[in-house]
Amino acid sequence: MSDNPNIHQKTLRESISFVGVGLHSGHKTRLTIHPAESGGINFQRSDVPPGTGLVAAKWYNVVDTTLSTVLANEHGVQVATVEHLMAALHGCGVDNALIDIDGPEVPILDGSAEPFTSTIEKYGTRELPERRNAIWIQQPIEVRQGDKFALLLPNPGQRITVTIDFPGTAIGVQTFSLELVNEAFRHDVARARTFGFAREIDALRRRGLARGGSLNNAILVDGDRIVNREGLRFANEFVRHKVLDAYGDMALAGVPIIGHYYGHKAGHALNQQLMQKLFAEISAWSYVRMEDYYRMLGLAMPGAETAMEEHRPGRQAQGAGRSGQ
């Protein structure tokens, strides 16, 4: 569900690096995102035996959805808590990248996608010759678990809607719906932080979770009170973060999804079930080139002139090599 409408695939203009602790593992990790010419988004664990560390960021590699989305390859090598980084890459229109990481979990940083998003935008992206495809939803796809559900609905644009309900807390019921156009992800979602509940901290840590969590990287809710001194970045920051999570999970489809994602009390587990059902029900959607999508809607193709200039014969694309914090 990328809000970047360019018709050519993109990668980073240069390598960028981040250092931080994992939200659940508590391990300090260094992560460097390198440009890639093709192949989608891939993680490369540098701390495991050679030949075993490549993990494709695809829905079929999801092995755990307990409070985060965890990927693994055929060697059992895992990369955890990928959703915020995937949302940032997707929101910035990055189709291809190799992510070198020296530990088992993506750094949580400030608990949002903002540090990833702002750094990618600072150092920039570049277009590639390959055209961008998308998944166009043509029939409803639905998964349910009790009163929780997640849907993908036909829609001429790219929209995401989420409703959450945490009774008896400062959160309550919140709904947020966003049309993914005009940098809406960056302005309205990327800064929303993850959150947790004071009553659950001890139990989570006994299970090996939330060991890296702090008031620097999460909103802590204690009943009807927000513990963080600085308060909230948005009045409805909680549901905006759930939009971010869903956006990152849907990015594991590998291409933008043209349709309306609607989640009601849905989390990573239902999002993964929705991805599984999407790719099982191949009659409910089709692949379409982004340029054909815009043409069918009678719209101009944003980025077409830039793409023609960038890829005309004799023009050398700008490469990468420098790492930035």
Image: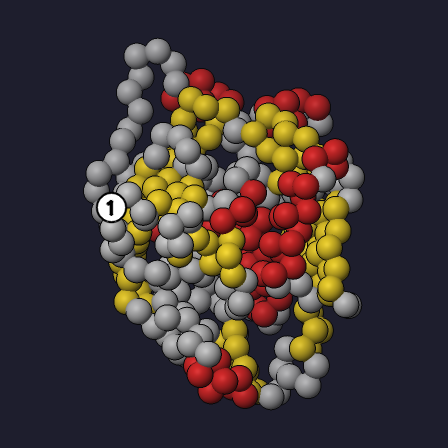
Residue 159 in the image: x percent, y percent? 67, 47
Count of numbered circles in the view: 1
Q: Looking at the picture, does residue 29 appear above or below residue 201?
A: above
Q: How is the image coloured?
A: secondary structure
Q: Quadrant of the N terminus?
A: top right
Taking depth in this image into account, of 125 and 37 the one nearest to the observer is 37
**Structural crowding at the residue carrying mark 1, measured as other residues with C-alpha within 10 Å and reported as few (<14), some (14–19) or many (≥20):** few
Rendered residue at 61%/61% (across/down): 269
Rendered residue at 55%/34% (across/down): 5
Taking depth in this image into account, of 316 and 305 the one nearest to the observer is 316
Q: Looking at the picture, does residue 173 appear above or below residue 6?
A: below
Residue 154 in the image: x percent, y percent? 75, 40
Residue 239 in the image: x percent, y percent? 62, 66
Task: Examine the rendering and report whether any part of residue 14 can be seen.
Answer: yes
Provide the residue designation for mark 1.
50
Taking depth in this image into account, of 270 and 311 the one nearest to the observer is 270
Taking depth in this image into account, of 208 and 96 the one nearest to the observer is 208
Task: Examine the rendering and report whether any part of residue 251 can be seen.
Answer: no
Instruction: Give, as a three-letter code, the residue at label 1.
Output: Pro
With 299 as the anchor, is 111 left or right in this view?
left
Q: Quadrant of the C terminus?
A: bottom left
Residue 291 in the image: x percent, y percent? 59, 24
Rendered residue at 55%/37% (across/down): 255
Which residue reaches farthest left? 322
Rendered residue at 42%/76% (across/down): 208
Q: Looking at the picture, does residue 310 appear above or below residue 259?
A: above
Identify the secondary structure beneath mark 1. loop
Which residue reaches farthest top? 313
